[in-house]
Image (cartoon, rainbow, N blue to C red):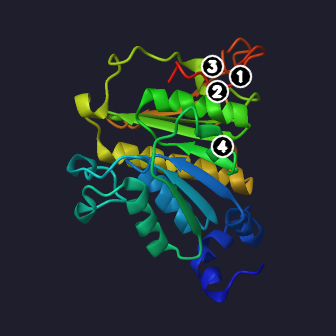
Amino acid sequence: MEFSKEELQRYDRNILLSGIGIEGQKKLRDSKVFVVGAGGLGSPVLYYLAAAGVGHIGICDGDIVEYSNLQRQILHNTNDINKNKAQSAKEKLQALNPHIKIDIVIERLSVTNAINIISEYDLVIESCDAFSSKFLINDACVLANKILIRASALHFCGQAMSIKPRVSACYACLFDAPPKGEVPTGASVGILGSVAGMFGCIEANEAIKIITGVGTPLFNQILSCDIRDMEFRKIEVKRNMNCRVCGNSGITQLDFDLY
């Protein structure tokens, strides 16, 4: 299907880019991306995917908008207080780009629904702050063989990486699930809103690169930055063949007791 005159005008700056062009724009239109979390990271991810013309976006968030969110979760405003975040996000994104399809999941991902939901999409973007959710999404993406883009932001720091299941290092290759209550959160130590915004933009960039084939994704690499000195670091990592998830004897189903 050809683009309408309005769509050609809307995506003109994308189409002008060497490496994207009209064919890359069609790849964006035909792609299906699932974003878990419509908060500090998810807000810029979703805005830029919708603006870029990703044709089908899924949004999962079971939380409601609170006043403390508005310092960084730029998809939402004061009028959205007590509204579900996925629903609030959908309203803003459809207003931005009515040419795309948006589905929402107004609940948290769980062991019982994660694989079935993400299996409908081409790639998944994790924009959560709960470590249990990060491990659940990583494990589900490995089992469903879906590329995962993930990031985290806390205090003045952030990090991002992309994961190609059973090819590059997964989240569980590098990190063990910490004991509950022992990990600092934005609610306990604070977070600069623009740090979440910056790393959400990096996640959106990764998605566009992977969909269009432009550039080199962050497979087997962690990109990190402390904005106080604005020094970006790229850390090379490797897949762990003994990983409990993606290793040679990795999981074959999600563990109800782990998340």
Q: Which label's residue is closer to the chain start, 2 or 1? A: 2
Label 3–label 1 contact, CB within 8 A: yes
Q: Which residue is mark 2?
A: 170
Residue furthest out toward the bottom:
5
Question: Please, what secondary structure does the residue beneath circle 2 have?
Answer: loop
Q: Assess disc 4: are there few (<14), some (14-19) or many (≥20) residues with their C-alpha within 10 Å of its C-alpha.
A: few
- In this rendered view, identify the residue nearer to me: 58 or 216: 58
Q: Position of residue 125 (x, y in %)?
A: 56, 45
Q: Which residue is mark 3?
A: 173
Quarter of the figure with the N terminus:
bottom right
Q: CA distance from mark 1 to mark 4?
A: 19 Å
Q: Residue at x 55, y 23 (%)?
A: 256
- Against 6, residue 258 (above or below) is above
Residue type marked 2:
Cys
The total of numbered circles placed on residues is: 4
Q: Which residue is mark 1?
A: 246
Q: Which label's residue is closer to the chain start, 4 or 3? A: 4
Which of the two discs, 4 and 3, sits closer to the camera? Answer: 4
One can see residue 206 in this view = yes
Question: Please, what secondary structure does the residue beneath circle 3 have?
Answer: helix
Q: Residue at x 59, y 21 (%)?
A: 255
Q: Assess disc 1: are there few (<14), some (14-19) or many (≥20) residues with their C-alpha within 10 Å of its C-alpha.
A: many
Q: CA distance from mark 2 to mark 1?
A: 7 Å
Label 3–label 2 contact, CB within 8 A: yes
Label 2–label 4 contact, CB within 8 A: no
Q: Position of residue 188 (x, y in %)?
A: 24, 28
Residue type marked 1:
Cys
Q: Which residue is mark 4?
A: 116
Give the side of residue 156 with respect to residue 100, left or right. Answer: left
